[in-house]
Amino acid sequence: MTGNGWAPALDAVLGGVTQGEMAARVPGVVAMLTDRQGNVYEGARGLRDLGTGTAMTTDTVFAIFSTTKAIGGTAVLQCVEEGLLDLDAPARDYAPGLGELQVLEGFGPGGVPRFRPPKSDITTRQLLLHTAGFGYDFFNRDYLKMAAEHGQPSVVTASREALMTPLLFDPGEKWEYGSNIDWAGQVVEGIRGKRLSAVLAERVFAPLGITDMAFTRSAEMKARTATVHARGADGSLTPLDFALPDNPEIDMAGHGLYGTVGEYMKFIRMWLNDGMGPQGRVLKPETVAMAVQNGLQPHQQVVMLPGVIPSLSNDAEFFPGLRKGWSLTFMVNEEEAPTGRPAGAIGWAGLANLFYWIDRQNGFGGFWATQILPFGDPVSFGGYLDFETAVYDRLRNRPAA
């Protein structure tokens, strides 16, 4: 698995972020690289938990946070393929709760929020593109004010009430990263008439051979779960008593899954192989080709994510200065990245500093998993970029077959 020339450079990257002084490392990391056939590199370094000293292993279970989004988006695309969903119809036709939401216009005297009806209905396409009007309280000050002063619950509670947030702007007005895909999961549930967990198990996980990924962990998965750590201002790391809820009220398509990196690689390979899994087709090739294209309009731009809750996120952005779009549902870099990632590649991240990319042009994809808050951790994010760069350095210098 790692004896094919990839290991020296990639092992060095993992070692570099897990060795040395506390302020210069991460507790532990799992990173993998795949081509269209299978994993060509699997690495694990460091510890699952600094408190217990348990070693990080390749079968470690992670809360994968927003790397869940593309999996939820896949279930949406399957509904489109089957003619069950019109991406441009009002999404409230499938998820009626969307019809109850209003636009937050600001705050009046005493901090009382002001609301008005939206000028148009939200569509499922807008949900997938993050142009529907939703945000996150750790990236948006108005949502943070709603949480702090008006009891708006965090999405990590996985409660129905957490979905019922106001819109920050009229649908289609701009791009803002937020709880859109959680609502897209509700669209799928409305169409299928069953929980998203059941839909994914049957229609995504089964054809991919995924068995170690779920919204609710088994006891055995819990025993292998990495602990989330907090990075202090001085660089120190502290284990947190934090976990996404098992048995959630809502299966959150935007962030709720637990899984191993090895299982996620099966999902990445499906995108490298035009929608085909080892045990059946997940998406049609034409759906894959459509879903990886930038779907934003010129007035809708992917922008830096401002870290308004410092304990949860730093200011964060992939490849500052490069044009970036959004597809159904990945970030698309529209220019070659400094790492070597080509224009048109797709990828994204998860709050606890998990990162992945899928390069269909070259037939490679990778995943980097840590469990650290806040997001945009310089050591983990920097290590991930080094990992990706090392991959492209070797691709450029690899002898011809």
Image (cartoon, grey):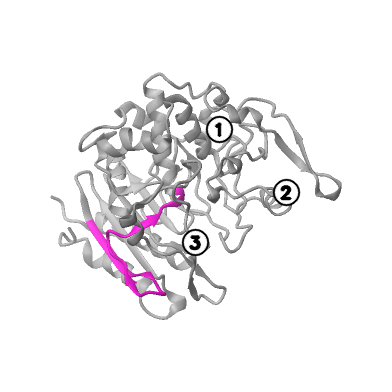
Is 45 included in the stretch rendered in magenta?
yes
Report the front residue among 294 and 371.
371
Q: Earlier in the sequence, mark 1 or mark 3?
A: 3
Contact between labelled residues 1 and 2, with CB atoms less than 8 Å apart: no
What is the CA distance from the residue labelled 1 to the residue labelled 3? 38 Å
The label shown at residue 242 is: 3
Question: Amino acid under label 3?
Answer: Phe
Report the front residue among 129 and 304.
129
Q: Residue at x 61, y 40 (%)?
A: 134
Residue beneath disc 1? 297
Q: Residue at x 49, y 61 (%)?
A: 242
Contact between labelled residues 3 and 1, with CB atoms less than 8 Å apart: no
Q: What element carries label 3?
A: loop
Say whether residue 292 is visible: no
Q: What element carries label 1?
A: loop
Residue reaching furthest to the left: 401
Work out which quarter of the rendered image holds the N terminus and state it.
bottom left
Q: Give percent across and percent down for residue 278.
A: 20, 38
Q: Which of marks 2 and 3 is nearer the N terminus?
A: 2
As displayed, is residue 236 above or below residue 309? below
Residue beneath disc 2? 150
Q: Which residue is drawn at 40% across and 48% down?
A: 216
Query: Would residue 134 be found to the left or right of residue 74 on screen?
Result: right
Q: Is mark 2 on a helix, strand or loop?
A: helix
Report the front residue among 143 and 307.
143
Which residues, given as a range, are shown in magenta? Answer: 41-66
Q: Earlier in the sequence, mark 2 or mark 1?
A: 2
Within 10 Å of the Cα at label 2, are there few (<14), some (14-19), or many (20+) other Cα atoms? few
As displayed, is residue 269 above or below residue 92? below
What is the CA distance from the residue labelled 2 to the residue labelled 3? 23 Å
